[in-house]
Amino acid sequence: MYFWSKIICKFGASKISLIFTKIALKPLQTNLFHIVLSAFFLTIGIGKIHSQEIKNKTKTESAKTQPDSIAISLKQAQAKLADSIPTDSVKAKKAVLESKIRYKAQKYAKLNQKDKLITLYDNAELYYQDIELKAGLIVFNYEKNEVYAGRIKDSTGTLIQYPVFKQGSNVVEPDSIRFNYKTKKALIWNSRTDQGEFKIKAEVSKRINDSVYFLKGARFTTAKDIEDPEYYFYTNRIKYVPKKKVVTGLTNMVIADVPTPIALPFAFFPMTTENQSGLIIPTFGDNRQRGYFLQNGGYYFSLGDHYDLAVLGDYYTNGSYAMRFESSYAWRYKFRGNVNVRFENLITSERGLPDYERNKIYNIQWSHSQDAKANPNSRFSASVNLGSSQYFRQSVNNYNIGSQLNNTMNSSITYSKTFNTVPQVMFTLGATHAQNTNTEEISMTLPSLQASVDRVYPFVGKNGVKKGALKNINLQYNLRGENRFNTKDSLFFKSEMFKDAKTAMQHSIPLSTNFKIFKYFSATSSVNYEEVWYLKTIRKSYDFARAKDTVVEVDGFDAYRTYSFSSSLGTTIYGTFKFGDDKKIQAIRHVMRPSVSYSYMPSFEKYYDTYASDASGRMELREYTRFEGGIYGAPGKVNSSSVGFSLSNTFEAKVTDRDSTKTEPKKVMLLNNLNFSTSYSLTADSLKWAPLRVSGGTNLFKDKMNINFGMTLDPYAIDNNGKRFEKFNIDNGGSLFRMTSANMTINYSISSRDGGDKKENKQGLRNGGRDDDLFGTNTDFSDRRESQFDEEDETDDDKFSGFFNAELPWDMTFAYQLTYSNNSREKEITGNSLMVSINTDLTPRWKAGVSTGYDFVNKGVTFTQFRFERDLLSWRMDFNWVPYGTTASWNFFIGIKSGVLSDIKWDKRSLPDRTLR
């Protein structure tokens, strides 16, 4: 103590405390002795400062204020001391780990704090920040910011538990990995990763950062098994940017582990998960009619998340060319659709030769559907298929026999709106199109209007009960309007088309009621008022100069009004025939619905005019109505009063169920319907009875077979000229009825697969063909990735379960049609044909199919197509052949299934000879 007193007296306590405070603030020299000693001298120094300041104060200062002065002096001393201490340049160390580590292992997890290591063994898992790592062995060095993961051996010495490294959405499956999670760099041995449809494996990979990898000795493929792919591209140098691109050096294609001469000095493969604009590589080939060609080349425009556009073109060396615009659009929970516009300029032979022809054809298709959730009160839909009548018969870029054989194209665009008023009002605005491709006649309505006001019950009270004839009286208002064009294919949307437009509007107000008679009979009665407006009528006259009748169109508004009355009475009769609960067929139920109806319409002669004609060689007066040829017809000239009779039947059986555990019998429909209908005219002078029409239908074999039939039975006889006359056929030496026509159709579809439903041929149906493959499959040469058969995602185990237990899936569709005609005692079968389509899996990878038919009237085989397909895992090979007829052709294709490499293909075909008309 004496020693420290001498030191203090010589140097001063404040200086000594300052020296020890500086020493104490140095982090590397801090110890308890320095801290205590510096505190001691600091206290003495502050006390000396305090005593000196007190001496300088006035003696008159009271003792009460002295503690405040001491406190102020203490703060000032602390401030001076803080200012006199220099700032230390050594920064404090950050934490070694930036976030928590979660880890686990099946056998053990060892923590070595000395070496900053965490070792996990057997089914090890480690989670740090956005890193997920699973492997047999994991070593985490949190001092060097590195992670090592590798495999382990099982009891047999086999390497198991390969590492799975995941950071964000990127997943890598290597043999081993060394990763610095601070610099984001890594070394990876035998890495395996999936990027979209690509699978990539590299001997050594170097990860530079989150977005760049360099690979050495890499293979990439779209095959499912990266370890044993059917094909792959091999390169020694790759720059790989996940989800964006792969840039390679010299690249060689290897098929079945055999290098091919197909190589590229460098290659670029897009890897984005989003749509991107880019070139579409054309297909090269030759055609014996038009020479060499480049087909289906163009550009794809990625216009946004909701729509896109592909522009494709063809060019032939003889000058023929084609253009196509294909666009798809979709907005979730609102609508979706697609538009296809196609144009082809076809040239046959060479200019100057006698068989030189040039023809331009086009086709427009538009499909639009609205989501039901978008707006429950309004709806817009479109189904458009219009264009040149010969398009599907002459187009060089699609092949669909169903569309070629079909003779109609139809379109419809509608917008409907419902107004939730009282009463409810419904409104529909649309356009329709019907085209006969044989006659090339087109009928189009643009626009068409329909509106209706819901039923109003004027005599129903506040309780809403509708009981009795009076309270069931209701009325409704309906409106129809059309602007119709009838034209030819060659005049479609030309000025001549609009000259012959017909415009009309039809108003109708039905007033009806219904009630019960004697409890079991249902009666209905209605009166209908109808008014039709026309903007164009006709006037007939006789042209004496040219000696013939003439028809002149008269522009201007005109209308006619009609009314009619109708009533009906019907009931339902139930009959059950029981055979016993112990029988296979326990009972048959027969339901009959007979109905008698009456209709009356008076004569509207006031709308008829006369004109003098000498066309027959003698002057006579002829009657006509100026409304002839109108959209909604013309008013009737004579009274019409008739009674109608109809009877509908259904037959249902109750049979014992094969499942003994079920106590209730099984219901089986025998006949869905069996209908009879005829009428008797009360005003006709002769031939009062109309022919009896019989129709029916049923479904058999669990609704897989559909049978429909119909016939017309005439009670009257015919003379030698084939005309009906007033004498019953039975009185003329014949039977009670004379069958004038009959028809029957049978459609049957069966499959070995559960359910038996086949893939619907949507594009073939949209083109105007069939939704099945009875007329073969349709082929779009611009996209050959789609299979000709029903594709199923099956594993090898699902398809093959032993040599003698191999499954051979198959399906069969057939349609039979029979038509009989006997209008003039010809007793002729006018149509009798059978069409069959069979598809089967010959092996788990081989598929074969055939579509054919036979015409029993013409005694010849109808259209026939053979189809073969080989599933080459990531590749597909198919061949179809039409051996004879006007559509004789063949087509061979082999290519990669994946869309990203769909341009790697070989397509060879021989199209049928097309005749330009």
Image (tube, helix red, strand yellow):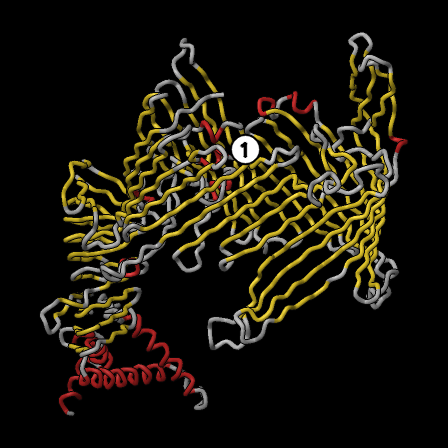
Does residue 290 appear left or right of residue 746 in this picture?
Answer: left
Which residue is found at the position 50% from the left and 76% from the top? 662
Q: Secondary structure at mark 1?
A: loop
Badge 1 amino acid: Asn
Q: Which quarter of the rendered picture does the N terminus lie within?
A: bottom left
Towards the viewer: 902 or 256: 256
Q: Quadrant of residue 887?
A: top left
Residue 910 vs 572, above or below: the answer is above
Which residue was labeled with disc 1? 407
| Side of 772 where 511 appears, left or right | right
Residue 685 position within the rendered picture, expressed as x and y whole percent measured from the top left: 85, 37
Q: Residue at x 17, y 73 (%)?
A: 116
Residue 886 picture location, percent across and down: 42, 28
* Residue 297 shows up from this direction: no
Is there any visible trace of residue 514 in the rendered image?
Answer: yes
Q: Is residue 555 above or below residue 140?
A: above
Residue 352: percent from left, percent from top? 41, 8
Tell me residue 541's x, y (percent).
83, 17
Give neighbour class at mark 1: few <14, some 14-19, many 20+ (Cα, 10 Å).
Answer: some
Answer with left or right where residue 345 lies relative to residue 36. right
Residue depicted at 39% across the width and 57% down the height: 753
Measuring 42% from the left and 10% from the top, which residue is drawn there?
A: 354
- Relative placement, left or right, of 93 versus 483 is left
Q: Is residue 3 above or below residue 85?
A: below
Which residue is at the far right?
606
Residue lying furthest bottom in this view?
A: 1
